[in-house]
Image (tube, grey):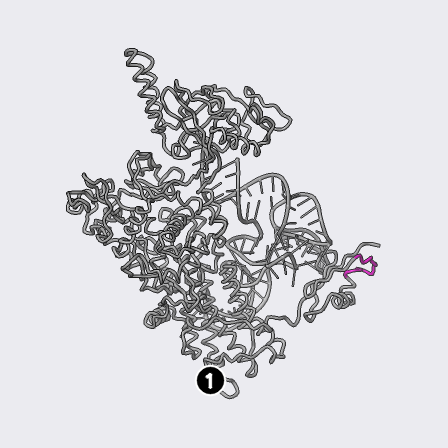
Amino acid sequence: MGYDFQAIETKWQKIWENQKSFEVETDPGKPKFYCLEMFPYPSGALHMGHVRNYSMGDMLARFLRKKGFNVLYPMGFDAFGMPAENAAIKYKTKPHEWTWNNIEYMTNQLKRMGYSYDWRRRVESCNPDYYRWNQWIFLQMYKKGLVYRKQAPVNWCEPCGTVLANEQVVNGACWRCETPVVKKNLEQWFIKITDYAQELLDNIDTQLTGWPERVRIMQRNWLGRSEGARLSFRVEELDYTIEAFTTRFDTVYGITFIALAPEHELIKAMIDKLSEKAEKKGSGDGGSSEAKQMSDFVARCAAQSAIERSDAGGEKLGLKTPFTGAHPVTGEPVPIWIANYILMDYGTGAIMGVPAHDQRDFDFCRKYGIPIIPVIQPEGETLDGATMEAAFEDDGLSCNSAQFNGLPTQKAIQAMIDWGEKEGLCKREVNFRLRDWLISRQRYWGTPIPFVHCPKCGLVPVPEDQLPVLLPEDVQVVDVGRSPLLDLPEWLETACPVCGGKARREAETMDTFFCSSWYFDRYCSPGFDKAPFNAKDTDYWMPVDQYIGGIEHACLHLIYARFFTMFLSDAGLLPCNVREPFTNLLTQGMVIKEGAKMSKSLGNVVDPTEIVDKYGADTVRLFILFASPPQNDLDWSEQGVEGAHRFLNRVWRFVEDNLEGLTHEPSSGDVYSESDPARVPMSALSDPVQRDFKRKIHNTIFSVTRDINEEKQFNTAIARLMELTNALYAFQPAEPVGYKLRREAVDVLLNCLSPFSPHIAEELWRMLGNKTLLAKTPWPVSEEDALVADVVTIVVQVNGKVRVKLSMPAGLDETQLKDIVMSDAQVKEKIAPQGIPKEIVKIIAVPDKLVNIVVKDL
RNA sequence: GCGAGGGUGGCGGAACUGGUAGACGCGCCAGACUUAGGAUCUGGUACUUUCGAGUGUAGGGGUUCGAGUCCCCUCCUUCGCACCA
């Protein structure tokens, strides 16, 4: 017959579907396991990265089902977003149409891979059944005061025609199209994710212990907590108080300037003041030119790209203003500067400048000739502000700091803040790098933000009973620069829910990361229409036990989803003890080819469909899990694929060629019954070859189970199965016992192989006469007594070098071991070569492992 | 610059608490069966070698009876963050 993978795969996919083999229900009586993969964007077709991701997930889901868990294993599509609009323009279609076609196509591709999803639970975020709950959740956040609108300098991507959240700006460029972003001052929708900054940080240590350390560090850095104090500089002339945040309050006596971000609100007041002065004095006076200088400088900074502004090595630009602020401690006037290296979106947009102890301030002062006053000395040294070559940023002893002189830095920080708070000069403060989440997008293909602009009532939320605010589907997108929603008066114009008067819908849509922040909750209650999900389902299934996806979401989706979970838990929608959505996280590496990530521009993309056509889904799945450990990058190699295919062929041929002997008792000809695995206990075996073979079978079960379950090393698990197959070919069965053993080995092999390559395993299982589905057959259990070795190899070392290997019965104690080894002729020769006697200094014996004899010349 | 991973055959990668380095696979070499084979099977495959052995896990040092594994220094590399006050 041969291994006809096409026929087999189609056959079993149909059987699983007809028998609803992978459909699950909420059942609090059973132990649950929620296995989840990051749902794909329906870009058109699956790529190898998807195949890798989902092959891991499916393997785990199938394994855990066999281990007796009620496994929730769903799939869906993250279906809103930019590419649909671009494609619609390019192919003259509609985003709606394009997206749904892709969803259907990719669903079929996934089915062809044999993934065991419960397809009834498929979620598509562009489905009104889903996004109405986006809107609903948004309104709940609004009610809790977590949603607000604010005029702010925001990141704008020109090609995408929209604003971006901070998380979506990578190295100053758009995360999707990599175009440098520009700052625009716009009124936008924000979500107060910063309210949860502390919990997001705390839980990393207490709850995310099942996450890779790398992601935990990245999130910690992203949240960027720092402790310090807020202090203020009074500017009498402008009747204004500049606030600044510092982590180094111990350096206050070293302040020689104040610096404002070019976007700082005080600058406008300064310009006004200067112009006013100039007017009083008459035109042509220095006052107005000062004002002009200032606005020119601000404009110049604004023209710098985000990349230039945020480059640490970039040149620092500054402008001295004619104003001063009062030093918070001494009251002395301190000059106020405007500097391009001060960021408006961190802290207060103003800093206290301490050049002696901050390298950035130091560079700035050297350039502009601002004095440098050291207030910390390294022990035994005296710094001189005039000659210092770099800022001294390490700990040391305070100096020039009144009563705090001589205090070591860490103590000085605490003591000075304590004192400052008592004197009313500063206030302890914690700052985060995390910014509020900018949620609105000037795009069409997304969830409409459920608000209405009423000329009388202002901004009015759409009442919940009027949800969803449907996104018009029959829309031509002609230009990326303008949302077509703005040109749909019949959609745009509506009645104000409060006064009933003429009002206009909010035409902006939500960031798609909003959709992906709770889809895993929706999977628990597909189609539920009373709420985003049914508490009885989420109470059972949440949190996700194993999440698998790419590292690229470390500071995007994986932070947003955590925030959502905390919010939903606080809102009473999720159980109060569920604060984190994902207990364990596996971040898989990329699939690369010829040293580079597969990409269209490099032309090194391998289409999964072609490979599946050529070798079958079982082979592709096996190869992709075998070629590399999950976290590593995987180098695509068609020869490797052939190797995996060869292995499956070997398994196939073994069963096919030995079918008679595997299914019938050799002496009587009786058929082995499927319910009886015909196992022979270890205790009944005396032949050492048979005992070894039995041990091989059970060692395989043991190590495959451990590799999958604990180590998450799927590559080594597969290697064990290859070893067992090799042993199977080498084993010569004799007598009924031998045949039974061989059958046992084949049963174990197929059972353990089935999570990796389910179709072939299922087919061979059926060929052996089994009536049940292998997918529903419990995972094998290793027999304790079959794991213990009879004979061990004892390595004999002389001075730490391997000299002789001796076979010995297992379980000898140290003394017995030493006696046998020391009386061995070979060993004697190695200790005293050519009969030259040596002094034996020491003998180390490790039972069942080795003996090391330490000798020296006499 | 800061932070976190990694450096093991020709290649992907194994090696549990320190105890036989190189499992498994790819590739390569030889042989078998074949009209043929890019099918299949068998054997070999770290390096050097005077065939006794010697040397090998980026380099150097240390701890130990014994180090890929633990400690220190150096080099290389990947990734993340990067004017965060």
Tell me the SS state at disc 1: loop
Q: Residue furthest bottom?
A: A668
Q: Position of residue A506 (x, y in %)?
A: 23, 43
Based on the picture, tell me whether residue A840 belongs to the magenta stretch.
yes
Q: Viewed as shown, does residue A817 lie left or right of A325?
A: right
Q: Viewed as shown, does residue A452 lie left or right of A355?
A: left
Q: Chain of mark 1?
A: A
Q: Is residue A180 above or below residue A477?
A: above
Q: Viewed as shown, does residue A792 lie left or right of A64?
A: right
Q: Could you tell me if residue A121 is visible in this image?
A: yes
Q: Quadrant of residue A319?
A: top left
Residue depicted at x 54% and y 26%: A390
Q: Which quadrant would the C terminus of chain A be assigned to in this image?
A: bottom right
Based on the picture, tell me whether residue A131 belongs to the magenta stretch.
no
- Look at the image and give the residue range highlighted in magenta: A830-841
Q: Position of residue A725 (x, y in %)?
A: 52, 70
Q: Position of residue A103 (x, y in %)?
A: 29, 57
In this rendering, the count of numbered labels is 1
Foreground of the two, A275 or A489: A275
Foreground of the two, A757 or A847: A847
Category of crowding for the residue at label 1, using alpha-carbon neighbours closer than 10 angstroms: few (below 14), some (14–19), many (at least 20):
some
Q: Is residue A387 above or below residue A180?
A: above
Residue pointed to by mark 1: A671
Q: Viewed as shown, does residue A754 lie left or right of A534?
A: right
Q: Which quadrant would the N terminus of chain A be assigned to in this image?
A: bottom left
Q: Could you tell me if residue A341 is visible in this image?
A: no
Q: Position of residue A597 (x, y in %)?
A: 42, 49
Residue depicted at x 61% and y 78%: A683
Disc 1 residue type? Answer: Val
Residue depicted at x 52% and y 65%: A704
Q: Is residue A716 above or below residue A272?
A: below
